[in-house]
Image (cartoon, rainbow, N blue to C red):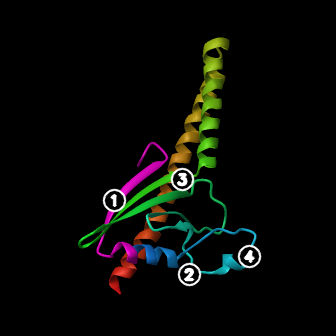
Amino acid sequence: MNLLPFHSETLVSALSKQEVLGHLIRVTAEVNYLDQRTRGDKTILFNGMVGQKGFRISKVVDKGDTFLPLVLGQVEETPRGSIIFLKYKLFPGALFFLAFWSVVLLGFAGYYFGLIQNFFYGGICLFLSLLNYGLAIYFFNRQVKASRTVFYKLINLQLKD
């Protein structure tokens, strides 16, 4: 389990670069929240964009999830298939709010510990800061695991065909 909201991995696939990107293009759609018709398609597994050099995707979810990872990937061609480099990270907005509330709560803890000498309130703020960060890391790692499962199934199902 990572202590930062970031995870990276490298996968080796027997599929060529074009096959990997082709499979991703088939199950990825650009997000359009205003068009309700695009939400009902069960063949779409990822939201995002797939290009010739790589992709920027996230798992399709029914409800909003703050800790859903953004998956950045690059696919490199090899003589026997391809190598897929994946980076999972929080979306910038979620990362901003995680950092903001962690800094605010740590600031209050420092204020109560240092200036006012109220250790009870300082302890509460420190505990809330650690709880906030710990829960964020837990939920982020849980969503990384779910996104990895969907991605692995996509690659493995294509290998069986």
Q: Earlier in the sequence, mark 4 or mark 2?
A: 4
Q: Which residue is mark 3?
A: 139
Residue appearing at x 33%, y 84% in the figure: 160
Label 2, label 3: how far apart the Cα atoms are: 26 Å
On the picture, is 147 further left or further right than 120? left
Q: Which residues are magenta?
A: 1-19
Where does the image place residue 74, in percent across and percent down from the top left?
41, 61
Front position in the image: 33 or 114 = 33
State the SS at label 4: helix
Residue appearing at x 46%, y 48% in the figure: 6
Where does the image place residue 81, in percent across and percent down from the top left?
28, 73
Label 2, label 1: how far apart the Cα atoms are: 25 Å
Label 1, label 3: how far apart the Cα atoms are: 22 Å
User: What amino acid type should be assigned to the residue bearing mark 1?
Assistant: Thr
User: What amino acid type should be assigned to the residue bearing mark 4?
Assistant: Gln
Q: Earlier in the sequence, mark 1 or mark 3?
A: 1
Q: Earlier in the sequence, mark 3 or mark 4?
A: 4
User: What amino acid type should be assigned to the residue bearing mark 2?
Assistant: Thr
Q: Which residue is mark 2?
A: 43
**Labels 1 & 3 near each other (Cβ < 8 A):** no
Where does the image place residue 67, in percent across and percent down from the top left?
58, 53
Instruction: Identify the mark at residue 36; answer none if there is no mark.
Output: 4
**Labels 4 & 2 near each other (Cβ < 8 A):** no
Is residue 58 found inside the magenta-colored segment of the image?
no
Measured along the vertical axis of the image, is residue 53 above or below residue 22? Answer: above
State the SS at label 1: strand
Is residue 2 found inside the magenta-colored segment of the image?
yes
State the SS at label 2: loop
Where does the image place residue 148, in percent across and percent down from the top left?
44, 64
